Image (cartoon, rainbow, N blue to C red):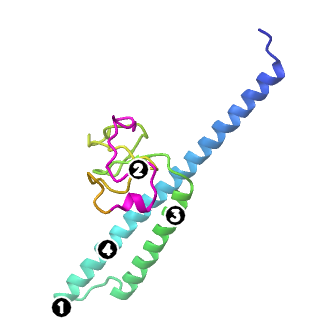
Amino acid sequence: MNINKNDLVESLRQAGDVVAQKVDGLYQRTRLSFSISSKESELADLYRELGQTVYEQEKGRTTHNMSRSALIAMIDACIKELQELRSRRSEAGPVYRFCPACGRPVSEKANFCAVCGAKIEPDPPKDAPCCEGDPCPEDCCKETESPACDGESVREDAWGDPLD
């Protein structure tokens, strides 16, 4: 077997570039996720402070907190920042799916959440029907011309292959 040293070096360089890109993408998504988590915590604190301010004012007590309108403006700004961060994270592409019970990231092939143990349903195939009816109750699959549905629901095994 004759291996060209230059071809091997070039293949290794290309593989290294791919790995570096994936690591950079993961790093960027992780930074965005951390920023989102911090902003969600800040938003929860603002909501809590607004609730306390409303309660104190309702009871006729004087508060040294910010006014309701100032807190609401801060909440609106925080929500806008959260939307922007989430948009940027979604543009970076998904790395994980998220547990429907606890919201933690799970691997693409996980069947159960490693944190809370909840069952993770597989993502539907891209050409899956938009309904679960048996047969399709609205004929919606026929309207969208989904190749996976002829008006009957499609049954699949755990790997997404159609059952006979």
**Quadrant containing the C terminus in the rendered view:** top left
Mark 3 and mark 4 lie on one chain; the one further toward the N terminus is 4
Magenta residues span 139-164
Q: What residue would you read off at disc 3?
A: 87
The answer to whether 147 is drawn above or below residue 5 in the figure is: below
Q: How far is the residue under mark 3 from the one under mark 1?
A: 42 Å
Q: Are marks 3 and 1 in contact (CB under 8 Å)?
A: no
Instruction: Inspect this view and state whether residue 61 appears.
Output: no
* Viewer-side residue, 124 vs 55: 124
* Viewer-side residue, 15 vs 39: 15
Q: Quadrant of residue 38?
A: bottom left
Q: Are marks 4 and 1 in contact (CB under 8 Å)?
A: no
The answer to whether 53 is drawn above or below residue 161 in the figure is: below
Mark 4 and mark 2 lie on one chain; the one further toward the N terminus is 4
Residue 129 magenta-highlighted: no
Q: What residue would you read off at disc 1?
A: 60
> What residue sits 76% from the left and 8% below the top?
1
Which class describes the residues within 10 Å of circle 2: few (<14), some (14-19), or many (20+)? some
Mark 4 and mark 1 lie on one chain; the one further toward the N terminus is 4
Q: Which mark is residue 47?
A: 4
Residue 85 shown left or right of residue 67 in the figure: right
Which class describes the residues within 10 Å of circle 3: few (<14), some (14-19), or many (20+)? few
* Badge 2 amino acid: Ala
Q: Quadrant of residue 55?
A: bottom left
Q: How far is the residue under mark 4 from the one under mark 1?
A: 20 Å
Q: How far is the residue under mark 2 from the one under mark 3?
A: 26 Å
> What residue sits 47% from the left and 74% below the top?
80
Q: What residue would you read off at disc 2?
A: 128
Mark 3 and mark 1 lie on one chain; the one further toward the N terminus is 1
Front: mark 2 or 3? 2
* Badge 1 amino acid: Gly
